[in-house]
Image (spheres, helix red, strand yellow):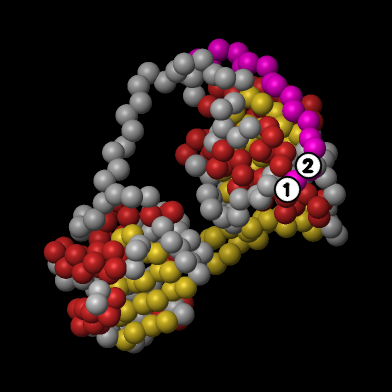
């Protein structure tokens, strides 16, 4: 068995998964194959970013879900015997990965945030968070192939390289699926996508009432950033939309600057900001867990500290 496969439904998924695949390929002395949907990343883009071969999935009939491609992907996987198959851990990606692993009788490791190759054992070693983010679990694949799902933004997207050459092949259309999409009802977003924000000001349980969240919003605007929140404010008190919830039950963010206001720093929340470059915090409890994870911390009442910061920023 040889080769690293990435299976992507979108252009963004393809580039990030290629970034992960290119980390493994040199260690394993093997190739990378991109299995992508037509209309997502082009074969030329995938090859420039590290794919040695691109397999183009045929366009689906209207109403057919992405999972309808499973018979074709399974057939190719059986013929090529890749060592590992990488999916993005989106809702559709997780579903497709699980179904493919069952069809191939292969191992499945979900939500991996780091990958390495152990030359001594010939195994891929995977890391993922455990116990609500309090620990990192390491697993080794005892057999190949292994199907792996990767949370979005866990790896840097692969950069384009000049002069790379590769092969492209179109895959046959899958047989008609018994599952049809009869209607789509997209969830209406009432806020911006904070996963793309360079600066995030996060409101925590230290705020006394809903109206006071305007203070955090003012600071976010002054810093040119976006507003985020902890789970109690979004899912329990419903002071802010669930789209803004950061943590295990919300989104994972990687801002250049994260500012926590009245955030205690429980592991379930801080897991969502592990990728932040700089963490700042304001909390009146000097023993708040967030201070141990902060680059800069202010022990004080946010209702006194934030207005003073705003006075400097807005003058």
Answer above or below: position of 55 versus 178.
below
Residue 99 x, y percent position in the rendering: 58, 32
- Alpha carbon of mark 1 to alpha carbon of mark 2: how far? 7 Å
Residue 241 x, y percent position in the rendering: 26, 51
Residue 164's tag is: 2
Secondary structure of the residue carrying numbered label 1: loop
Whether 18 is among the magenta residues is no
Answer above or below: position of 277 versus 198.
below
Residue 307 x, y percent position in the rendering: 21, 78
Residue 257 x, y percent position in the rendering: 43, 69
Q: Is residue 184 visible?
A: yes
Q: Residue at x 56, y 38 (%)?
A: 11
User: What main secondary structure does the magenta stretch of the protein show?
Assistant: loop
Report the number of discs.
2
Answer above or below: position of 220 versus 163.
below
Whether 177 is among the magenta residues is yes
**The quarter of the displayed image where residue 297 is located:** bottom left
Secondary structure of the residue carrying numbered label 2: loop
Q: Residue at x 14, y 64 (%)?
A: 211
Q: Say which of 156 and 7 sits in front.
A: 156
Left or right of 130: which side holds 101?
right
Q: Which residue is mark 1?
A: 161
- Asked if marks 1 and 2 touch (Cβ < 8 Å), the reply is yes
Tell me the magenta residue range: 162-178
């Amino acid at each position: 068995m040889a080769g690293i496969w990435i299976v992507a439904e979108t252009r963004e998924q393809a580039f990030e998964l290629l970034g992960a695949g290119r980390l493994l390929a040199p260690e394993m002395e093997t190739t990378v194959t991109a299995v992508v949907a037509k209309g997502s990343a082009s074969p030329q883009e995938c090859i420039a970013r590290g794919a040695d071969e691109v397999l183009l999935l045929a366009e689906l009939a209207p109403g057919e879900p992405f999972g309808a491609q499973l018979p074709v992907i399974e057939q190719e996987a059986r013929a090529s015997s890749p060592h590992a198959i990488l999916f993005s851990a989106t809702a559709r990606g997780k579903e497709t990965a699980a179904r493919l692993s069952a069809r191939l009788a292969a191992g499945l490791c979900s939500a991996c945030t780091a990958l390495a190759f152990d030359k001594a054992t010939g195994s891929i070693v995977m890391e993922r968070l455990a116990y609500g983010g309090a620990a990192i679990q390491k697993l080794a694949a005892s057999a190949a192939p292994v199907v792996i799902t990767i949370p979005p933004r866990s790896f840097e997207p692969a950069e384009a390289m000049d002069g790379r050459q590769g092969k492209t092949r179109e895959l046959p259309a899958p047989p008609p699926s018994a599952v049809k999409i009869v209607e789509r009802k997209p969830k209406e977003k009432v806020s911006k996508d904070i996963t793309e924000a360079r600066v995030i000001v996060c409101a925590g349980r230290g705020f006394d009432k809903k109206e006071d969240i305007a203070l955090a919003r003012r600071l976010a605007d002054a810093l040119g950033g976006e507003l985020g929140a902890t789970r109690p404010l979004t899912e329990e008190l419903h002071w802010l939309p669930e789209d803004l919830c950061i943590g295990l039950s919300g989104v994972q963010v990687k801002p250049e600057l994260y500012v926590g206001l009245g955030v205690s720093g429980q592991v379930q929340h801080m897991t969502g900001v592990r990728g932040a470059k700089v963490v700042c915090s304001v909390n009146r409890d000097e023993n708040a867990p967030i201070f141990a994870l902060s680059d800069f911390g202010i022990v004080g009442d946010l209702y006194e500290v934030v207005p003073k910061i705003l006075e400097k920023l807005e003058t």
